[in-house]
Amino acid sequence: MGWMKDETGLERCEANFVPLTPLSFLKRAAQVYPDREALVYHGTRRSYAEYHERVSRLASALVKLGVKPGDVVATLLPNLPAHAEAHFGVPACGGVLNTINTRLDADTIAYILDHGEAKVILCDPQFLPTLMQATELMERTPPKIIEVADDEAGVHAHGHYTEYEDLLATGDAEFAWIMPQDEWESLALNYTSGTTGKPKGVVCHHRGTYLMTMGTVVSWQLPRYARYLTIVPLFHCNNWNHVWLMPMLGATVVGCRDITAKAIYDAIADEGVTHFGAAPIVLNTIVNAKPEDRREFDHVVDVFTAGAPPPAATLAAIEPLGFQVTQVYGLTETYGHVTECLWQERWNDLQDDERYAIKARTGIAMPMMEDITAMDPETMQQIPMDGKTQGEIMIRGNPVMKGYLKNPEATQEAFRGGYFHSGDIAIQHPDGYLQIADRAKDIIISGGENISSVEVEGVMMRHPSVLLCAVVAKPDPKWGEVPCAFVELKDGATETEEALIAFAREKLAGFKTPKAVVFQDLPKTSTGKIQKFELRQIARSV
């Protein structure tokens, strides 16, 4: 019985209910747009018919390698056509896609491969040495390595592993995709540093991804046949789900391996790029491009930016260059962006400084979300929308993760009170627009990448001269934030800033390494807890 008094015979069936999945977009695009350009990367140009065929071959080949529904297939790839193909090919064989950050160190990659139990990994030649180190550190059986050769990698193919094109040759172009029987089935496994040194496995489902793509089209006002540049790494929230949505529009995905001002300007001028997503650091790169790297273009490029809130000065500088920028906000746990700073007509006549200050706000919920607001995390009550009171950003909606893999305690805590607790602190204006006041206390966001201060502190504390260490975010004009380490040395010990940074660099990925070290007694509470809020104040002037 439903809402009507008599619903006899009104049952769910195959004709009126199909599990939501982004796989549907590419299946449709191969029929509707078979000859349109789907993927572009330097000399490579593939139509939607070719895109679909290669995805089918990949799915078939993975099944022949023993990948079963629910198995994890990992990637260690830049933004190449093969990485876009994996976003469809892995789930088309029933697998779960685990895109791994190419900037991570071997220890962390080994942990991810062990924890996620990857059966196969697609790897670019540039990252094979790190992957080989990682497999030696693994406790489980290492995944089968497939090498994805690329002339732009800067190194030759290793030759010891099956090459991607050879793998596709073993697949069946007519392979029947294994579509989800339940839209709650897992689609992707993404690792985030969270608030501890150990990365957490964020599990995303088909339903959330499908709705995320639909909401993005509405919010971004994406047109049919858009030309989209892949600046956001495909390992970062699966490119904010953008690669999954582009077939819906018959759009063209333009690959970009190295994110430079020249590469961006060339893609806009030569390939007619109309849209891209990027962290604020990329906006700064465009603004500060050398004259010889700039190109003329005759259309407006629409940009979603997320990460640390973009400075108003950056927004003011980039828009006259031909870029229309909208700030969005989200987390790995929310599949990417879930709020937008939706522009209101009442702001049109404001002075530039006021307009760009508003554009730097975190914004309001995108249409696929149920509710996003700021609450007192203890009482779960809405904070006053006065533009002053601080609360934690709370999120509810279908594009929220299933939970953390093999970590029910962390999952339960994250969903306490019926909302996802973002850990980000914000004020809320009278019109409901959120504005981040402070990031989660221990997380540093550098160039759009999360860095766990606990992880960096753990490495620094291993130095024989270090007694105590606390790491906080230091504002940086290029990266937004960088790690700054405050260190107390052991009695009688002497050490230099350069030596400690070099020590950390040996054990951490480059972007996680502290960019400054301050030697001082650390401020502590009566119970011995380090008062990081004091250190953040100091770091602003270091």
Image (cartoon, helix red, strand yellow):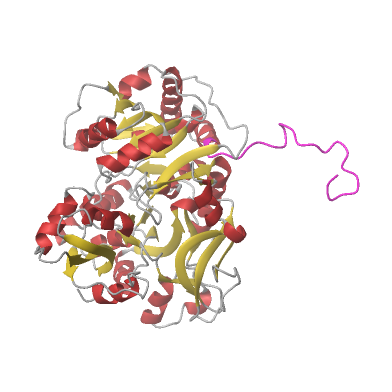
Q: Position of residue 480 (x, y in %)?
A: 29, 65
* Residue 167 sits above or below residue 102 on the image: above
User: Is 483 on the left or on the right of 113, as rendered?
Assistant: left
Res. 267 visible in picture: yes
Quarter holding the C terminus is bottom left
Q: What range of the chain is rendered magenta?
A: 1-23
| In the foreground, 252 or 135 | 135
Residue at 44% across, 51% down: 332
Residue 201 falls in image quadrant: top left
User: Is 240 on the left or on the right of 248, as rendered?
Assistant: left
Q: Position of residue 188 (x, y in %)?
A: 47, 40
Is residue 15 covered in magenta? Answer: yes
Res. 85 visible in picture: no
Residue 78 falls in image quadrant: top left
Quarter holding the N terminus is top right
Is residue 243 covered in magenta? Answer: no
User: Is 19 on the left or on the right of 506, as rendered?
Assistant: right
Taking the view exactly as shown, the residue that stands out farthest to the right is 5
Q: Position of residue 65 (x, y in %)?
A: 41, 19
Q: Position of residue 193 (x, y in %)?
A: 37, 52
Residue at 27% across, 58% down: 457
The secondary structure that most of the magenta stretch takes on is: loop
Residue at 16% across, 64% down: 490
Residue 461 falls in image quadrant: bottom left
